[in-house]
Amino acid sequence: MPTSTSTTTPVETQRPAPIRARGRRVLRILSAIAVLVAITVASIAFALQVTPERSVHAFGQTVSVGTAPPTWHLRGPGQAILFGQTIPTQVDFVGPVRPQLTLTDISLNEQVAGLFSPGPHASVADTLGSALVSGWRWYFATEILFVALAAIVLLGAVAGWRRYHGKKTVMVIAGGVLFVEAVNLGLIGVTAFTAPGILRDVRSLDSVVGQTQMAPVAVAPGPPLTGVQAIVLGDSTAAGLGGPPHAGATANDTACERSSFAFADVLSRVNEWNVDNLACSGATIPDGIIGPQSEGGRTMRPQLAVAKRAPNAQAVIVSVGANDLQWNTLIRLCAAADSCDNRAITAYFQRRLSTFTSDYLGLLSQLGALPGNPTIVINQYYAPFASSQDCLASLGLSADKVDTLLQDLQALNDVLANGAATFGYQTVQPDFTGHELCTDQSYVQGPTDPAPLHPNARGQLVIALADERALLGAP
């Protein structure tokens, strides 16, 4: 007999329609919230990126006011951009988005010089604080407009994609803009409304940019050096380390290891100038240029203090920075490490560079107070080696390590050049290209010479020629 089979179809359990509709509504609401949050984030990020900094002027200074990148912390320092370097301000602000102050130009005079250290300059300081407050408020108002503009564009795009028309489109855009601006004000509003009070209380530039306060350098005791036409301030590069001593070397010449092939001596011989070389091996800005220096068993007066005894000097050449960064230590660390761009060495270099940048600001401000308003020339550093050369591999410096060191040297030179430009001083970059260490006719002393990596007689001549072109206005 034929067998009959029967198939039993299970009864599907259907969701009630109201539950399904509620689920779809919740999903639409969540989607709308996600889109609105995305638009909010994008609008604020766009505004912070494109809102132009506001340049303010006070007593010969130009400072651009903007915002630093947002942070998760609700209180902390803002940012100062000084000669291309980012430095935390010494004053704290409230909120995740804080002011960024970029020092762009200084025309130094007595009133401006007073802003580099606290003192009885109330009207000047009040003007500085008021200018910063004005710049910050302008920036904040402009940022609000850019946020609204970005939100309108994005919300309009969403409305068009959803094919909204007329009143609904207007409501979506208006409501969305209000939401975005409410979030924007919540994030940066605290800073926006509290920063003016903090900026208004700024009494000196050192409290803005984190500069280490330096007292004005007094004139060194002694008779005026009326016959001096040019002065050299600096470190071992300017002292001519490694060369033969002067025929009539003084005790200070010997202690500072000044030599007869230093570029100061070359300028003196070639141009028949009376050049006073005050440079000293081991000098830094705090210990040697602005402050006293102990070297060779003697205590030298600050180079800047001695320079102030030369009222008729027409030029001052400055070579400084390598010792401030402890360049020799950095090279030794690099040679001993597997890599020169590891975190420890990079942090060490950045810390030293930040400290030097602040000290350099103090030096530049005090150079402007020299008598007779001489021409100021800031020497950048030459590149002593090239990554294409492998003669230092036996000393632990591979081509990759040399590349890193050259990048660090360029960072120092950028600070030197940017600082000089900010104050309107000249800057010089001696070119040793093709004559680095290990090349034929090198301009640099080698590992077995008296002062490795320092310029030899040819290198000092190249530096002297570069300075001479700057002083004589040659291209």
Image (spheres, rainbow, N blue to C red):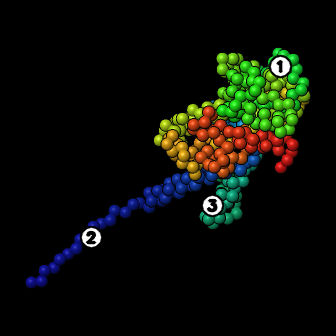
- Residue 58 in which image quadrant: top right
Residue 351 in sight here: no
Name the quadrant of the N terminus: bottom left
Point out which mark residue 41 bears.
none
Spatial CA distance of label 3 from label 1 is: 70 Å
Kind of residue at disc 2: Thr
Kind of residue at disc 3: Val
Please give the name of the residue rendered at 85% of the width and 30% of the height, measured from the top-left corner. 274
Label 2 sits on a secondary structure element that is loop
Q: Position of residue 64 (x, y in %)?
A: 77, 40
Q: Which residue is identified by label 1?
A: 219
Q: Position of residue 17 (x, y in %)?
A: 44, 61
Number of numbered discs on residues: 3
Please give the name of the residue rendered at 71% of the width and 28% of the height, measured from the top-left corner. 245
Q: Quick one: 267 or 59, which is closer to the camera?
A: 267
Of badges 2 and 3, nearer the viewer stands 3
Please give the name of the residue rendered at 61% of the width and 64% of the height, measured from the top-left corner. 162
Going from N to C along the chain, the mark reached first, 2 or 3, is: 2
Q: Quick one: 253 or 217, which is closer to the camera?
A: 253
Point out which mark residue 158 bears.
3
Asked if the residue at tag 3 contacts the one at tag 2, i.e. Cβ–Cβ closer than 8 Å, the answer is: no
Please give the name of the residue rendered at 52% of the width and 53% of the height, measured from the top-left corner. 30
Q: Residues within 10 Å of mark 3 (few under 14, many from 20)?
A: some
Asked if the residue at tag 1 contacts the one at tag 3, i.e. Cβ–Cβ closer than 8 Å, the answer is: no
Vertical comparison of 405 with 209: above or below: below
